[in-house]
Image: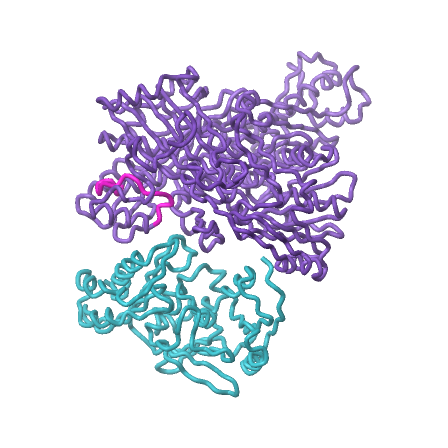
Chain colours: A purple, B cyan
Amino acid sequence: MTVTENQAPAQPEVGRARRRKEDQRLITGRTRWTDNLQVPGMLHLAMVRSPFAHARITAIDVEAARKARNVVAVITGQDVKDEQGSLPNAWPITPEQVTPAHPPVAVDEVHFAGEIVAVVVARSAAEARDAAELVDVDYEELPAVLDLKEAAQDTVLAHPDLGTNKSALWVFDSKEAGTGGDVEDAIRQARDGGVLIEREFRQQRLIPAFMEPRSVLVDPTGEQITMWTATQIPHILRFLLAAVLGVPESKVRVIAPDVGGGFGGKLQTTPEEFIAMVLARRLGKPIKYTETRSESLLSAHHGRDQWQKLTLAATKDGTVTGFKVELLANLGAYVALVGGGVPVLGAFMFNAIYKFPAYHFACQTVLTNTTWTDAYRGAGRPEATFGIERMMDELAAELDMDPLEVREKNWIKHEEFPFTTVAGMEYDSGNYEAATARAKELFDYDALRREQAERRERQDPVQLGIGVSTFTEMCGLAPSRVLGSLDYGAGGWEHASVRMLPTGKVEVVTGTSPHGQGHETAWSQIVADRLGVPFEDVEVLHGDTAISHKGLDTYGSRSLVVGGEAVVRAADKVIEKAKPVAAHLLEASVDDLEFSAGRFGVKGTDKGLTIQEIALASFAAHNLPDGIEPGLDSDATFDPVNFSFPHGTHLCAMEVDTETGETRMRTYVCVDDVGVIVNPLIVEGQVHGGLVQGIAQALWEGATYDDQGTLVTGSFVDYTLPTAADTISFVTENTTSPATTNSLGTKGVGEAGTIASTPCVVNAIVDALRPLGIHDVEMPCTPERVWRAIQNASAGSVDETQRDTAPHFDPDQPNQDTPDPEGGAR
Amino acid sequence: MIPASFDYVAPQSLTDALAALAEHGDDAKVLAGGQSLLPILRMRLNAPSVVIDLGKVTELQGISDEGDHLVIGAMTTYAAVLASEAVSTHAALLSKAVATVADPQIRHRGTVGGALVHADPAGDVGAPVLALDAELVIAGQGGATRTVPAADFFEDLFTTAVGEDELLTQIRIPKHTGWGAHYEKFVRVSHQWSIVAVAATVRAEGGSIAEARVGLTNMGSTPLRATAVEQALVGQSATEEAVRQACARAADGTNPPSDLNGDADYRRHLASVLTRRAVLAAAGA
């Protein structure tokens, strides 16, 4: 028998398409979600919620509920008003921001349908629910303001005591900031011999429909009060529970066990969490609350919901000379945790991948009697990307240019990086040419354009549209100093510790809080390479403030680029810590050691010790050099110096059935540059999921209220989430421009697909219909909306294509009342 | 999503089921698969004090061939109908419609009889049952049974000819052997209720349409029959133009709802387009 010894070095872990180690327990249901947890003596909550969008609570009769079987307590806002505090807004975007108090249980008034007015505590969830039906609340209905534009007029007030619905006006101006010219000059010049594109777009309201509804369990019976909760942010929540409720932070432990998705929807400190905490403390008993899907759709925070008034100035060769953005952003009834900060995150991204010489951004946040809004996958950046990418298509159409050509004319060339943008961001690296060229090739762009021309020529009832969207985004939240300058209430660093156990196994503790992302796998790959240990020997711990005592959690595509870098640095410190021990045991000088593949070798000899051997020696501590502490572990806290700027080019072909308005996706190609990839399988999963979520905004999803402020899309019958059956196979590839601001060269990928796909799909639909004189279809582009656009176009009334979306506007035209820089609606 | 508490009865025979129904009357709801009833209970839109589960009444399950009719037990699941060669051979329209119902999980739980008695106008079995001229067998107290033609079965929104102390037992479908069939369902996402759907089955003879049956889903408070279209199709060649003309007025006399998925006028427009497509597909054109 011949044995061929393969001495090739082990394949590096970073870059391997490993299947996720967490999936077995997640897919087989062997894990424990919060709602599966049972604590002896646990009580259950049921919420009584307001059916009215705006009303005064005149009386609450809880007697019948209190007498119901196994009911322990029934609590109203009056009962807890002195101890429940007000839910926090961590990002007041201006010093003058108008911020209503947000009691977890409404005390005198309710401000959206779904707000909690009473809480039943019972021995079982079913008994709590039954008793909740017996709570009798008298309301005096108040006028509700539901429409965003109407709210900005301040004729009906969401919170009458505040005197206005306008919460904050946030402005960035490139001339004032010294990052560019005066946008009004550019607009004047464009009016006079250039091209001026004026559009108003609607970003509809969306609901982050994570798979696991939110659930919280509080056990106050230990020395520390322990809260298990389905959250993205255990660390932030612990801090805010302490800060708001006055409980010593050291007495609070928050655990996010396995969490079934968040998409920003669990980046919140919720009324339910605060109520569970307050009541568990008051009653001295463990308390659990798990929302129903209906409650989740109704009262967990929603996302998006903007009107975007956009003015783009260009020369006739397609060079953009200025871009002006005026937003109205709907906060809903309260200013949520990030709240008005979400649209502000878009302020730095409306200029996208382009070299605009002048830029102005103004965002007016507005309170209404609707469910509060906050982060939803992409948070501010999908809105911005939609705005600019729709506008670039409109510019191309106006000039009869190819939409990719217009983009190329304006984008930052790869040799121009690093590049400081008109919004003041420094993009570290990228190559838009390379991603676009590859995408065109995979898409067979020219062939599809030919087919489009043929279908137009023969007036095929099924028309073809080609959608283009490029994007970049700022993720990897975030340099703490930048957050400070934006008045955000926390930093943006991340923490990790890496510890070698005596047996040579490794525990990695991360301050990020995965809820489906696969950090356990990716972090293990990073550490396995760094320390030269087997992937299987690395265990990643997270989501429990008693284990991971320091962290800023998971959102904003930050975990790998910030948290991963902390892991790298902690691992490197472990090696540095091991080195003098190795030198001591090998009787060599530290300078003569080299560390490779998990082994400290003495240069020029075959002497060496593995890191596992050093770990055991450090544990035993029998023979350590003077001044060296036993144990092989290290911590690192990494505060990024810059954001992460992934980018990509997305192309999609949509067939539009002009008879029914039905749209069907034919092909979707995206080439994303997310820097160096740790795990290609995870990246592909992130991109696929992101694409579906973004496509869903374009085609399917939209939260709708009736005239009374009742959520019509209150179940999945009406809130039409797509499933795999509604999507096609996507073609995804990557180009690689390593980030220059972290050791591994990684960039964020969590939101990329969502950001680019929405405008790509809408651009495709509009492209199909453009010969009919149509230049917008409001999202979601339902078959009925598409059909009506076609009907109206053929009837010659293009301007009524969309009831509220005027394709062109004039500054003096009514119903175009976005804020001006002076504040106040025109 | 916890329903209000109720008592649960699971009779083993039709006789016992009818007895339970007689005993509890108004307070009872019949569980026949539960794909509509359970969400209603869980959302507390209804709170019966007793639920009578027909799941163990095996005599109500199964499909049999009775010469010129197929007989489908009311408690036969969608999945069983879909798997039946007898149905796909002799009542292809029902097979095609059932294939579009929701998803495999629901098709393995939901029953044809349950759906018919629930009588949601957006449900997918009413229109084919109507178009196929089926008869519905209803059992009453004291061993009484009566047979109601599909045309008289659907009375209004969620209302059928089945009385409070009665149960639907069988769907008798005259064989349409050799008829082409198509169910054209229009939805925004795959698991959605029909926005509009058209059930068409056609007997073609030498390139032209000898007979046609057309049922409409969600174009009014009950499934509807497009009889004017059926008549206009007779003798037409199975070509796009001829069928287009015959189907142009498919929405005449309908009263479709307006909701998030479309206003009534859009649904009327869809009905004519989808009818043409369904008929052409059924005719194999």
Query: In the rendered view of the protein, which quadrant contains the C terminus of chain A?
Result: top left
Residue B88 x/y as whole percent: 37, 70
Residue depicted at x 54% and y 21%:
A485
Examine the rendered structure and indicate whether residue A248 appears above or below residue B123: above
In magenta segment, residue A772: yes
Residue A271 x/y as whole percent: 61, 43
Residue depicted at x 49% and y 83%:
B140
A182, A551: nearer the viewer: A182
Examine the rendered structure and indicate whether residue A422 appears above or below residue A386: above
In magenta segment, residue A722: no
Q: Magenta-highlighted stretch: main secondary structure?
A: loop
Examine the rendered structure and indicate whether residue A670 appears above or below residue B179: above
Residue depicted at x 78% and y 19%:
A624
Residue A705 x/y as whole percent: 45, 49
- The magenta-colored residue range is A768-782
A671, B45: nearer the viewer: B45
Query: In the rendered view of the protein, which quadrant contains the N terminus of chain A?
Result: top right
Farthest residue, direction right: A622
Which picture quadrant has residue B253? Answer: bottom left
**B133 with respect to A177 (left or right):** left
A166, A553: nearer the viewer: A166
A128, B167: nearer the viewer: A128
Residue depicted at x 58% and y 26%:
A492
Q: Can residue B133 be seen in this view?
A: yes
Which picture quadrant has residue A393? Answer: top left
Examine the rendered structure and indicate whether residue A15 appears above or below residue B156: above
